[in-house]
Each structure stands twice: as C-alpha cells, then as structure tokens.
Amino acid sequence: MIRYPITPLNYSQHLKLKYNYHTDISNNLIDLVFNGNVDDAIIKEKQVNQDLLNLKNYHSMDWDNYFKFGGFPSVMHDTNHRNAFKKLYYSVETVVTKDLGTMNNLTANTQTNALRLMKFLAEKYPGDISQNALANKIKTSAGTVSTIMDLLEKTHLIFHIEPYAGANARAKKSWQYYFATPSIMHAINTKFGFSSINLTEYEGILLETLVGSNLVNLKNSEQFFEFSIFYDTHKVKKQKVDFIIKKDFDEVIPIEVGYGNKDDNQIKDAIRRYKSPHGIVISDTTKTIEKVDNVIFVPIKIFSLM
C-alpha cells in the first residue's frame, strides 16, 4: 500500500481551487529560500499582485480569511466566520473522538485528554515543552501523552520540530509542537476562549505556525528534495530565530518570522553564528520581496504561495 499525505492547502492551491487562478511562483520562492536568488521571485511577485487586483470576484480580505479560517476546501467559500470556525473545530473533534479510537483503540478518557491537550497547546507559545510537563498539565501519564502526540501527528493535526543540535543533545531536548494550520489553532481558541496572550503575540504565533506549516508541507511533498527543519537552541532567547532549515550538507538557513515592525538584528546574529550564506525574514509588514546584503525580506502573503 502506498500512502499519500493530504496536507492543508497553501495559498497557491487555495487560489487555484477557489478562483481557478494558477501561479508557478512556488519554484521561484524555493530558489529564494534555499539559494538566496530573489530576481525571478520579485518578477513573479509583481505579476501575482497585479493578477489578483484584476481577478474576478477576488476580495482584498481573501488572504486574511484564508490565514485564520482557511486551509481546507470545506470552508473555502464560507463568508460567515462563525460557520467556518465551527466546521474546523468539529472536524478536529471528529478526528479526536472517532479516528484516533480506530487507530489505537483509545479509551474515552484518553480521547478526552487528547482534546484537553490540543486546547492547552492552542493557548501557548509553540516553545519546547516536555511530555512530563504536558502530562502534569492535563493530569495524566507521560506514556499517555506520548501516545496522544504520536497519533495527533499521524492524523496531521499537529507536527513537531526538533532542536538544531548534535545527536546526544537532540535526544535530551524537548520538541516544539505546532498545529497543521493557523486556522486549527484559531478554531480551538475561538471555541474555548483565548488565553492571556495579547493580540500582537497571538497574531505572531499564528504567523509562525503558517510558516512552519508551509515548510513541513514542502518537505513532505513528493515533488521536492529532502531537507530538515529545526528550531534554534541559542541560549539567549532574544537572539533566537524561529526556524533553521538545512539541505543535505549545505549551510543552514535561518528564518525569522515577525508580526509588526521587525528589524534584522536577530537574523544577522543567526547568520553570523551559523556562518550562513543568507537569512530570511518573513513578516506581515514587509510590502515586497527585498534583499539587503545577505538578509531577504518576504511578505507573509507571498511566502504562503510556496
């Protein structure tokens, strides 16, 4: 039996299905990320922006709706956000209460713990956290948490990223967990109420989740080469970048995700630390692709087309 992973829609696929609009900018963005070549991506970016201005029935809020309520064909045409988040949440609930049980004969109590675990993950930063800490939080065993996390990954509701470190250090450090799309995280928080994280921080977490999701889906693509995704283990929190990617024996590429005004101090520090040829800053305030020395700035909307 051959298994094909069915991943959430990136924005290119969303535009194709919803508006029958096709762009091949993805290949140019891949070249930008891994090789630092921006010229072709800039040309395609201008074309895409012009096309969307003239695209029939395309609304200026389409990307914002995709960001918080999209990623799945079932909610693509919903104009009512309440209906969209309900569909997304009940899809998640169905996977946990029905699909997980058929995969591993989970008890009703374990399924309840799975929902509680997802609620807890939805209201926090995607930082590294031990399975013992998660077990204490939802008052169950570390073994149960391990089983739940493994099954949630197999159903593609969440994914994990390991630390950029040697084999021994990687075995000791915790993993970082992310939801498959920002819309799943947003649906859970909308259902149960938002945590104490302020709006700016919350939007930043959603952006980081979207970037991580795009990278993981690209890695799992049948048409693409193999590469690895890590999180930064630097001791100084303010100097950490969000993601580190590495292809084969090539140099690492640091990626920083920012919501609001974002300077280049973190990415420059990471470029120096890892001796990288270039680094990427992805933010919601960057208007167009721009390369300044060895730092490449990319708008989040354009990156989501990759």
Image (cartoon, rainbow, N blue to C red):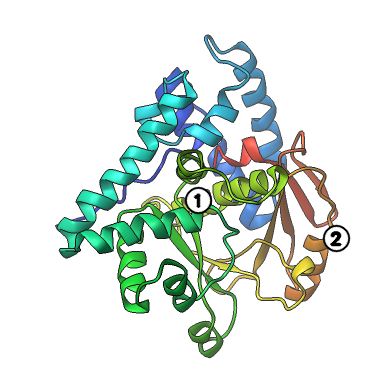
User: Would you say 69 lies left or right of 300 here?
Assistant: left
| On screen, residue 75 above or below 105 | above
Residue at 59% from the left image edge and 50% from the top image edge: 195
Quarter of the picture containing the N terminus is bottom left
| On screen, residue 127 above or below 155 | below
Residue at 60% from the left image edge and 59% from the top image edge: 125
Residue at 63% from the left image edge and 36% from the top image edge: 302
| Tag shown at residue 93 | none
Which element is circle 2 on? helix
Residue 250 image-quadrant placement: bottom right
Q: Nearer the viewer, residue 57 or 280?
A: 57
| Tag shown at residue 213 | 1
Which element is circle 1 on? helix
* Residue 220 percent coordinates (x, y): 40, 56
* Residue 289 percent coordinates (x, y): 74, 39
User: Would you say 69 lies left or right of 50 here?
Assistant: left
Q: Is residue 220 visible?
A: no
Three-letter amino acid code at the position of disc 2: Asn
| On screen, residue 40 above or below 141 | above
* Residue 35 percent coordinates (x, y): 65, 56
Q: CA distance from mark 1 to mark 2?
A: 25 Å
Marks 1 & 2, CB-CB < 8 Å contact: no
Pointer 1 local density, CA inside 10 Å: few below 14, some 14–19, many at least 20: many
Q: Nearer the viewer, residue 30 or 238?
A: 238
Three-letter amino acid code at the position of disc 1: Ser
* Residue 93 percent coordinates (x, y): 31, 45
Between disc 1 and disc 2, whose residue precedes? 1
Q: Which residue is mark 2?
A: 265
User: Would you say 110 lies left or right of 80 here?
Assistant: left
Residue 295 image-quadrant placement: bottom right
